[in-house]
Amino acid sequence: MLLKSHPYSASGTAVEANRSAASSMAVSQLLLDAKRAIAVDTEAALRCIEHAVSILGGEAALPRTSARGGLARWQIDRVKRHIEENLDGPLQVADLAEMAKLSAGYFSSAFKVSFGQSPHAYVLAKRLARAKQLMASSKMSLCAIAVDCGFSDQAHLCRQFRRAYGASPNVWRRSHFSNADDSLRGVA
């Protein structure tokens, strides 16, 4: 953004030229810094780009990688990966918070901002989705599926499944397999 020359200043254009050259150099440097930082620290790269845009007089409207008050992208990725890899075992909020290098209370709040649900609800939904997938793709017993998905026992799986889907796992599985069997036999 160029400054208008002062009406009483004889060297207004020289000042404008100096500021323009300084702005160009600053923007160039910021963009080079952003280029170097993009692979290592995307947040720093975005800050450099936003600063360059503000120098040029524009309005920075770059998308944010995390919601305000939420988890950073690296925290989201790390927590998601840990949950997926450890669904069959106990998953404590304190352990997830430690992975994200946050206190348990702050982590729970930030998790809810980022995922739209509490850590417990997210883990439960992931466990139920895995149970559904195993019921549809294998002939494992419900007891084995419950243990494989991190539920304490078959009754725990059945209770949570009925609450989420409105039917017991056995009823859901029979209806799912009977539809699959009909399509294999050519019955409509």
Image (cartoon, rainbow, N blue to C red):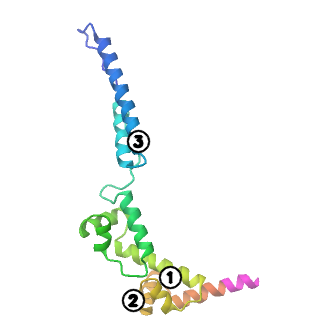
Q: Is residue 27 above or below residue 104?
A: above
- Please state the horizontal and vertical placement of residue 66, each as a whole percent of the image: 37, 55
Q: Give the label on residue 131, or none.
A: 1
Q: Could you say which is closer to the camera, residue 5 or residue 51?
A: 51
Residue at mark 3 to residue at mark 2: CA–CA distance: 49 Å
The image quadrant of residue 82 is: bottom left
Instruction: Determine whether label 2 and label 1 are within 8 Å by CB.
Output: no
Main secondary structure along the magenta-highlighted residues? helix
Identify the residue under disc 3.
36
Q: Is residue 51 above or below residue 14?
A: below
Instruction: Determine whether label 3 and label 1 are within 8 Å by CB.
Output: no
Q: Residues within 10 Å of mark 2 (few under 14, many from 20)?
A: some
Q: Is residue 16 above or below residue 56?
A: above
Identify residue type, mark 2: Ser
Identify the residue under disc 2.
152
Q: Which residues are magenta?
A: 180-188
- Please state the horizontal and vertical placement of residue 11, each as a whole percent of the image: 28, 9
The image quadrant of residue 100 is: bottom left
Q: Earlier in the sequence, mark 2 or mark 1?
A: 1
Residue at mark 2 to residue at mark 1: CA–CA distance: 13 Å
- The reply to whether the magenta stretch includes residue 163 is no
Tag 3, which secondary structure?
A: helix
Q: Residue at x 53, y 92 (%)?
A: 141
Residue at mark 3 to residue at mark 1: CA–CA distance: 44 Å
